[in-house]
Image (tube, helix red, strand yellow):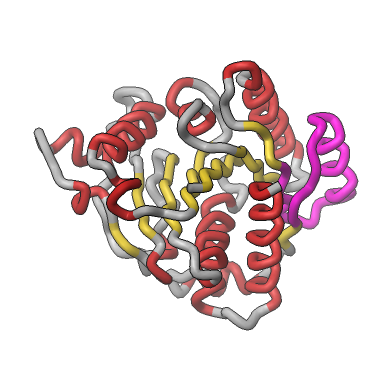
Amino acid sequence: MIKIAIYGKGGIGKSTTVSNIAVALAERGMSVMQIGCDPKADSTTLLRGNEHMETVLDLVRSKKDFELSDMVRVGYKGVVCVEAGGPTPGLGCAGRGIIAALEKLEEKKAYEVYKPDVVLYDVLGDVVCGGFSMPMRGGYADKVFVVTSGENMAIYAAANIAMAVANFKDRGYATLGGIILNKRNVKDEEEKVETLASDIDSKIVGTLSRSDTVTEAESLGKTVMEAFPDSEMACEYRKLADSIMEVMNA
């Protein structure tokens, strides 16, 4: 089982990227599980046609016990979807949802039941503390990939995520797999991200164009891979998925 954590600043297009990668891998015959580790609980919505699903933290709050089937929905191309969820606004720690989700998945033997070839953790990267660092820890992700643009705040967040990974390197935790450039067409964007990659001793594993195709697919409640499978953007997501797997299999 290959386990990948994809981090990035909120609003950087991380969940859209992860969902399209999930479909690209599923197209290749792989069994894929995507775990949304963002309090907004919107990581897997494009895989499920915007269908509502209860988050793990909602279930923990509302029920003494629940089944694995209550936590999981199967989306497009058979991608197994889980949303960690977040606390009641103003109360509790957002990272708690991630911890609860990962613990409950293990308790309910999700990995044995669904037998995923690939697990994708979609993690908010504005802060990398407590529960938000959980997917980096031993037994969870093998590699961390960071989505960024050339915008200053996105680069700042990416550098912090890389620092967190580096701080865990002596504990046998996940290592940094590379940078995913999700273009915003800002000035000197590629140069800025190449500099970031060099500064953190990493590399750009894939580049995604800024495209109206992504917006059009989202308006349909679908991934690009489902809505426009023959588009240039679908080709970019497939190429990115292949590049990530090359890193994982190296």
* Residue at (45, 58) in percent of width and height: 32
> As displayed, is residue 157 above or below residue 117?
above
> Along the horizontal axis of the image, is 2 left or right of 109?
right
> Along the horizontal axis of the image, is 96 left or right of 109?
right
Residue that lies at the very extreme toward the bottom in this rendered image: 230
Task: Decide which of 78, 236 is in the foreground and name it.
Answer: 78
Residue 7, position in %: x, y?
Answer: 58, 40
Residue 215, position in %: x, y?
Answer: 57, 68
* Residue at (75, 57) in percent of width and height: 207
> Along the horizontal axis of the image, is 30 left or right of 171?
left
Q: Is residue 93 visible?
A: yes
Q: How many marks?
A: 0
Q: Is residue 220 magenta?
A: no
Residue 37, position in %: x, y?
Answer: 43, 40
> As displayed, is residue 231 above or below residue 207?
below
> As displayed, is residue 222 above or below residue 10?
below
Q: From which residue to which does the magenta span run?
A: 178-206
Q: Is residue 204 magenta?
A: yes
Figure quadrant of residue 73 = bottom left
Q: Is residue 218 visible?
A: no
* Residue at (64, 16) in percent of width and height: 170
* Residue at (57, 35) in percent of width and height: 125
Residue 76, position in %: x, y?
Answer: 40, 70
> As displayed, is residue 153 above or below residue 237?
above
